[in-house]
Image (cartoon, helix red, strand yellow):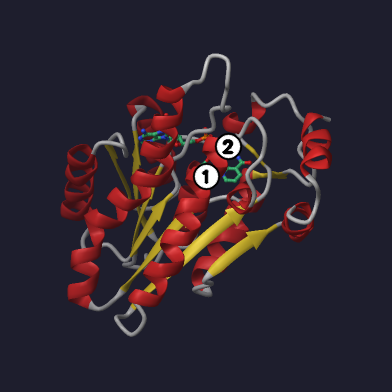
Amino acid sequence: MKLDPRVALITGASSGIGAALAREFARNNWSVGLIARRKDKLIELTEALRQSGAIAEYSEADVAQIESLQRAVAQLREKLGPIDLMIANAGIGIPTRIEPFNRMEIESTFQINTLGVVYAFDAVLPEMLQRQSGQLVAISSLAGFQGLPGESAYCASKAAVNVFLEGLRMQLRGRGIAVTCVCPGFVKTPMTDKDPYPQPFQMSAEKAATIIYRGIQKKKKVLRFPWQTSLMMRVVRWLPDWLVIKLVEH
Ligand SMILES: NC(=O)c1ccc[n+]([C@@H]2O[C@H](COP(=O)([O-])OP(=O)(O)OC[C@H]3O[C@@H](n4cnc5c(N)ncnc54)[C@H](OP(=O)(O)O)[C@@H]3O)[C@@H](O)[C@H]2O)c1
């Protein structure tokens, strides 16, 4: 098997979309570096990828801890070579509660979903700037385009990612580094399996990974999918609060 020398690092690769992305990139002959906190899951996936002939390495890290993430990226760079692509995918989805107000969980949401992206980019940007080549990707969400009751912190953490990447993309123009903001709708993963509400147009993590892979190859600026949910979120922006509440409660 001829292996492409390109190297992709994926945070949150132990489960769901991140694990599916690792399989998709490995299948397309990328060398993959897997990052997450659960070592057993990372070992299991790394071994499965190697058995299929891919080059795969893992390193444990908490994306909310800058030193931990920097250490993991340095280890993977040492083993795999210069990093061509960073996919900041790690994220959590905890409902926002008001009685009692779950401030600490809200803080964790921002630390992982928003600062986790900043830290992941921080760990690879200097080498990409030096080589004038690379791609920075964040797995945001269509939820980042609208605040929703019970999901305020999650939506806000993703809205921050969307806007951060928008500015960064323009700032990096002409420097050889592409920026892609991925905004999926509902994807079947352990994160959404625990949600009780209906998830229209839900797709498998494998299908999402194929769409994301193609979008990254095309260096899309913003990748929203599926189109039905994307359209729905645009329409929701025009609805009165009472109707949004009614829709979310059903
Ligand atoms: N599923 C959906 O419908 C959907 C839709 C839009 C966007 N997204 C986004 O897609 C991304 C992946 O979500 P998913 O649905 O695949 O969820 P998932 O199956 O729960 O996977 C989340 C991943 O993030 C990792 N992670 C969480 N906190 C971390 C931390 N502090 N440090 C390092 N890794 C951490 C987890 O690994 P460890 O626990 O091993 O650390 C796991 O690998 C998230 O950013 C999510 O917001 C999901």
Crowding at dot 1, Cα within 10 Å, few <14 / some 14-19 / many 20+, comes out as: many
Amino acid bearing label 2:
Ser
* Residue at point 39%, 49% (across, down): 10
| In the displayed structure image, the side of residue 243 where residue 44 appears, left or right | left
Amino acid bearing label 1:
Ala
Q: Is mark 2 within 8 Å of ligand 1?
A: no
Crowding at dot 2, Cα within 10 Å, few <14 / some 14-19 / many 20+, comes out as: some
Vertical side of 101 occupied by 229: above or below: below
Q: Position of residue 9 (x, y in %)?
A: 34, 53
Name the residue furthest top: 100
Q: Which residue position holds label 1?
A: 156
Q: Is mark 1 within 8 Å of ligand 1?
A: no
Q: Position of residue 54 (x, y in %)?
A: 39, 53
What whole-number distance in Å separates the C-alpha atoms at marks 2 and 1? 6 Å
Vertical side of 62 occupied by 235: above or below: below
Q: Position of residue 150 (x, y in %)?
A: 64, 30
- Is residue 159 in view from this perspective? yes
Which quarter of the figure is the C terminus placed in?
top right
Vertical side of 29 occupied by 105: above or below: above
Q: Secondary structure at mark 2?
A: helix
Contact? badges 2 and 1 (CB < 8 Å): yes
Residue closer to the observer: 234 or 66: 234
Which quarter of the figure is the N terminus placed in?
bottom left
- Is residue 16 in view from this perspective? no
* Residue at point 68%, 58% (across, down): 225
Residue closer to the observer: 56 or 248: 248
Q: Which residue position holds label 2?
A: 152
Q: Secondary structure at mark 1?
A: helix
* Residue at point 28%, 49% (across, down): 119
Residue closer to the observer: 66 or 72: 66
